[in-house]
């Protein structure tokens, strides 16, 4: 087994017997993303290297251009993600967009894309802004004009949970006051990517065979049941009372009736949600009509929740950290916020259009996604043999069935693409034409990139707008500087939390 890459002349990390390259994953001494991307720095001149996960050979892409080719031009060789969940153990996630593959993915992606157009997002943004604005009012009241300490991962998880519960499941909750409400409790379990669920999630990509063999499920059983019941009840209620609300359930019900389509004339001025937004590539669903049972609608909503909550909270946490330790950047961003306030009807509530044109806000967000990539690695499975030439002239054929990892974080921290990569510097994005767009991929690239990039960006921008309108963010006493990362989480997190001091601007 272990001579697989040797025979093909492909650089690879010498495996540890039985464990291959992933021993550190089991001992948790290194973050899983870093374990999986270890070869990237070791072999700087290759386009691809070899990895052994236990005894199975797999590939790691080093060249962003090769990733782009696989994701766009040669997409039909790489249509699938690596994980293969079963309906039996993961009834919701196995039906969700990230985890479905083949023809089913194509139909789902084509069917769901119209729910993410700019005008749909603008309509939905009203719900997001209301949810965040109401929460911020409560936070301001809580502060009573005095500075207070707060752990921001918890705060942003609550804000994100409430906003996503509103737009994904059609229910309004207030997790700042009603701290143990069932939607927050279940939502936390749904989006949990540390502890045992995180280990299982990592296993689906690092050790997919073992995961299936052990018949593990990622989501807790009670979470699957809770959301299925909640969404089915919500759907019945809407149909009986002819209710309409600009959220995902409404759009997915339209999809069920075959009424969901892109607007004939999308307003071009709404299109971009910023530099980092993933370009959309139309996927053809082969004209086949999808049956949207309640379980499919619940699965789609749950997948938006699962894919969107932690990633967006991570973006907000690290952005707040950088603003706290770089007060000049924070002040400049706050000045930009104050400068657009006159354009808002009530001087307080940000609109989609106003956020969209805030350049410095976009620079700060884009740089945070580069420096602290929330989703550090993605993957593809080779679905048809693929041949390309390596940098040394060696012709390589990736065989059907092989797994491929794409180290998004490594691209972002590679000094060949981003000089002085560990420095947080929004100025890099002052002139986007100077950014290597193949190497800047926080939302992945190609047909299977993130479907929710516009939503994630607008939500994060909205929340930070409210935060800086009301508070100065300063490092709290319990904050570790520089941050110590939690090596055991499947996502990106601070080991000791994001402890900040929030100083009301009126103080
Ligand atoms: C800052 C926030 C976010 C980041 C950094 C992020 C990043 C990513 C990345 C890197 C991928 C994999 C792309 C690939 O394999 O090429 C992905 C896929 C996905 N994301 Fe996001 N995401 C974010 C927010 C969201 C939100 C808000 C949603 C919900 C609507 C969402 C839903 C999804 C889904 C459903 C997929 C799978 C797409 C497919 O397989 O067709 N994400 N995301």
Image: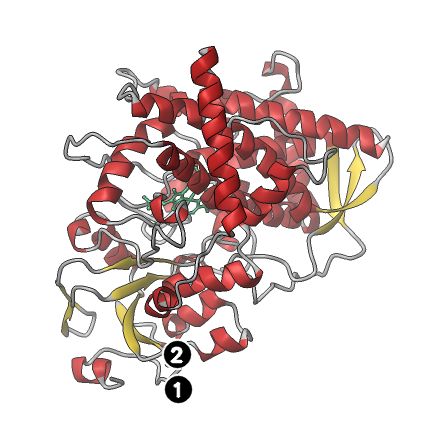
Task: Say the numbered circle drawn on residue 16.
Answer: 1
Quarter holding the C terminus?
A: top right
Callout 1: 10 Å neighbours few (<14), some, many (20+)?
A: some
The x, y position of residue 479, in whole percent, is 74, 57
Read off the residue under disc 2: 21
Contact flag, marks 1 and 2 (Cβ < 8 Å): yes
Q: Nearer the viewer, residue 112 or 410?
A: 112
Where is 394 relative to 3, above or below?
A: above
Q: Residue furthest bottom?
A: 17
Ligand 1 found in image quarter: top left
The x, y position of residue 190, in whole percent, is 53, 47
Q: Nearer the viewer, residue 410 or 107?
A: 107
**Is 364 displayed left or right of 337 in the figure?**
left
Quarter holding the N terminus?
A: bottom left
Task: Say the numbered circle drawn on residue 395.
Answer: none
The x, y position of residue 493, in whole percent, is 59, 57
**Is 382 displayed left or right of 132 in the figure?**
left
């Amino acid at each position: 087994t272990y001579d697989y890459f040797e025979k093909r002349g492909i650089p690879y990390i010498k495996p540890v017997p039985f464990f291959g390259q992933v021993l550190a994953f089991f001992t948790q001494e290194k973050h899983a993303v870093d374990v999986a991307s270890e070869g990237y720095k070791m072999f700087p001149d290759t386009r691809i290297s070899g990895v052994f996960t236990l005894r199975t050979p797999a590939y790691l892409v080093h060249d962003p251009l090769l990733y782009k080719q696989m994701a766009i031009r040669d997409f039909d060789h790489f249509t699938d993600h690596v994980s293969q969940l079963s309906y039996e153990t993961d009834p919701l996630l196995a039906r969700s967009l990230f985890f479905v593959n083949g023809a089913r993915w194509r139909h789902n992606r084509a069917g769901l894309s119209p729910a993410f157009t700019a005008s749909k997002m603008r309509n939905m943004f009203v719900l997001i802004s209301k949810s965040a604005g109401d929460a911020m009012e409560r936070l301001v009241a809580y502060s009573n004009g005095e500075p207070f300490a707060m752990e921001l991962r918890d705060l942003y998880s609550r804000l994100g949970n409430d906003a996503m519960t509103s737009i994904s499941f059609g229910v309004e909750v207030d997790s700042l006051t009603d701290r143990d409400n069932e939607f927050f409790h279940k939502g936390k379990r749904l989006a949990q990517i540390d502890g045992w669920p995180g280990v299982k999630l990592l296993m689906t990509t690092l050790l997919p065979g073992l995961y299936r063999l052990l018949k593990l499920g990622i989501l807790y059983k009670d979470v699957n049941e809770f959301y299925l019941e909640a969404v089915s009840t919500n759907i019945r209620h809407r149909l009986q009372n002819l209710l309409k609300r600009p959220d995902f359930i409404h759009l997915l019900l339209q999809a069920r009736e075959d009424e969901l389509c892109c607007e004939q004339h999308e307003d071009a001025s709404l299109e971009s949600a910023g530099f980092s937004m993933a370009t959309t590539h139309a996927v053809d669903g082969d004209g086949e009509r999808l049956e949207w049972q309640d379980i499919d609608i619940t699965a789609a909503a749950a997948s938006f929740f699962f894919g969107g909550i932690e990633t967006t909270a991570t973006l907000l946490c690290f952005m707040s950290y950088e603003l706290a330790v770089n007060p000049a950047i924070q002040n400049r961003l706050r000045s930009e916020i104050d400068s657009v306030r006159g354009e808002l009807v009530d001087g307080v509530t940000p609109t989609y259009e106003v956020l969209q044109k805030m350049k410095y806000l976009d620079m700060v967000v884009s740089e945070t996604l580069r420096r602290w990539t929330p989703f550090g690695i993605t993957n593809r499975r080779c679905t048809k043999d693929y041949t390309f030439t390596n940098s040394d002239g060696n012709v390589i054929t990736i065989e059907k069935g092989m797994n491929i990892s794409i180290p998004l974080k490594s691209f972002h921290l590679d000094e060949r693409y981003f000089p002085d990569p560990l420095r947080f510097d929004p100025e890099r994005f002052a002139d986007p034409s100077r950014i290597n767009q193949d190497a800047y991929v926080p939302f992945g690239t190609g047909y299977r990139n993130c479907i929710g990039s516009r939503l994630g960006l607008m939500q994060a921008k909205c929340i930070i707008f409210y935060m800086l309108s009301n508070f100065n963010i300063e490092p709290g006493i319990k904050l570790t500087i520089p941050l110590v990362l939690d090596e055991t989480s499947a996502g990106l997190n601070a080991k000791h939390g994001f402890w900040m001091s929030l100083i009301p601007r009126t103080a």
